Image (spheres, coloured by chain):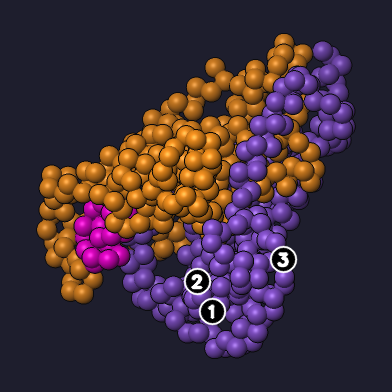
Chain colours: A purple, B orange
Amino acid sequence: MSASDLSSKIKHNSKRSNMRISRGKKINRSRAGNMLLFVLMAICGLFMVLPIVMIVNNSLKPPDELFQFPPRLFVRNPTLENFADLFVLMGDTWVPFSRYILNTIIITGGGTIGHVLCASLAAYPLAKRKFPGSTLLFNVVILSLMFSWTVTQIPNYMIISALGINNTYLALILPSWSFGIGLYLMKQFMEQIPDSIIESARLDGAKEIKVFWLIVMPNVKPAWLTLAIFQFQILWGNTGGMFLRSEELKPMQFAMQQIMAGGAARAGASAAVAFIIAAIPITFFLICQSSIFETMTTSGIKE
Amino acid sequence: MGNERLGSRIGKNKVFYLMLAPYFSLFFLFTILPVLISIFFSLTYFDMHSMPQFIGWGNYARLLLEDDLFIVALRNTLILAVVTGPVSYILCVLFAWIINEFRGFTRALLTLVFYAPSISGQAYLIWNIILTGDRYGFLNGLLMQGGFIQEAILWLQTEKYILPVLIVVQLWLSLGTGFLAFIAGLQTVDKTLYEAAAIDGVSNRWQELWFITLPAIRPQLMFGAIMQITQSFAIADVSLYLAGNPSINNSGATIVTTLLDYGGIRFEMGYASAIATVLFIMMVGTNKVVQRMLRRIGE
């Protein structure tokens, strides 16, 4: 017992990971239990991955297979023709296609980075400090998550028009910085950071903003990577709607959906569009998830 | 005297208010203000062309006393929420916990596999193929081959099948926001807790889950609960897409499909806002109960 206390102290001081646990077997695991879980996962997994399988297969189907009845899930004669068709259509849009890509990068990139920063910055004092109004502000954010987004669209439009940012990137970016989900998620993770870590940094004379950036944020890396996934997904799906009217401001999602709206003649290109619309957030997801696991597999947050 | 103390406490915490400022000024503009305006609209008649006319509790009286469709939608919503809410939530915890047993890239890949319905844009499309109402439908074909049924079933056009179908599809879609938050939360659990627990006599994975893992991710569990509530009470897209709008005899109508109907199609914004407010009160009440239950974990 005292040996384990000692080892945990050593680990704390050197901030090193527990190699025995991370590399070797887990404790409290029976082999039969492992097998059971594995089989369960395999069966459920096959069912869950169906939409991705369908999108990939459809994008590789030649037209006659896309219109085949009854439809088949798997492609028989895979071809890349659909993507070739799509690139031709992309060269033929109202404004150059690269413009839509640029718009998407500005909106999705700006919205995601800004939200993660704003929400984290506000979550830190709410998680770790008591001051007048802190509980009230947090509760208001929680409550706001439960109000239907559909009916606030009209007041939102009125406010954005009154601010004079209608039909600019800001009409999409600024509201996204203050979504409720980010503040709540970041606050919940920051609460778990032991006070002792923060106190010792403050005793060393670090300013609050430095404590936030150098101590708090690295410790909640899984949280902001997860938040980035949510935010990317929301903004990526945005077509600009009623807030962006000029064609040269519209995001890629809009241009892609225009191509899909072309009907049966564009069924092939639409299947390729569906692939790209899914592939980009999935790639972003895999990058974020892998780095969550890389940084945190060896140790959790420790005192 | 009290005010002065408050003033000095605010002054001492100036740096924190500065950190809150960017988020909360935007939050006030783009969330609080719109919600307050919506609640005001709920007390008016507002067709989005002329100015809103104040009618007091009129919308609420009509909603709760006269609108038969709303009562059907309320009933459907409650059934869907009571069934899919808790089950989805438990599935999220369970799958996140099992995936946490795997390592490296396998784990990232498994997370993707289970999150797939939430991330691949047109996930419901696959259910149209599975549930097609003729003998070419995947499920019908399977059941007919197996000899369970003689004739193809119109899954999406038969009243009694609509709610069960929506429940199944919604459960299939359930590994979303909460699930990813749990995955991330499990990463931050201090691994030495497990060693200490093993020494203290925790001897199997279920005890470890209840006494160590779940209490360690309690903040994430609370986050996931709210996400689950907002999701389960707001089921609409699945119904609109699979059952159609309007669905057969309104068997797939939910509070949010009704809301979309009034707000988006009939331009009765005041009435739609009243529906949103009622839904909001239902969610807040449910959340109070659920958060109280979550405090009992690990006891």
Respond whether the residues carrying marks 3 and 1 are from the same subunit: yes
> CA–CA distance between discs 3 and 1?
20 Å
Instruction: Tell me the quadrant of the picture where the N terminus of chain B can be found.
Output: top left
* SS at badge 2: loop
Residue type marked 3: Asn
Residue drawn at point x = 62 percent, y = 82 percent: A90
* SS at badge 1: helix
Q: Residue under label 3, please give it.
A: A77
Instruction: Tell me the quadrant of the picture where the C terminus of chain B can be found.
Output: top right
Task: Decide whether residue B267 is among the magenta residues.
Answer: yes
Residue A169 image point, x, y percent: 52, 76
Q: Are marks 3 and 1 in contact (CB under 8 Å)?
A: no
Respond whether the residues carrying marks 1 and 2 are from the same subunit: yes
* SS at badge 3: loop
Residue type marked 2: Thr
Residue B68 image point, x, y percent: 17, 46
Q: Name the dominant secondary structure of the magenta segment.
A: helix
Looking at the rendering, the stretch of residues picked out in magenta corresponds to: B253-276
Q: Are marks 3 and 2 in contact (CB under 8 Å)?
A: no
N-terminal of the pair, mark 3 or mark 2, is 3
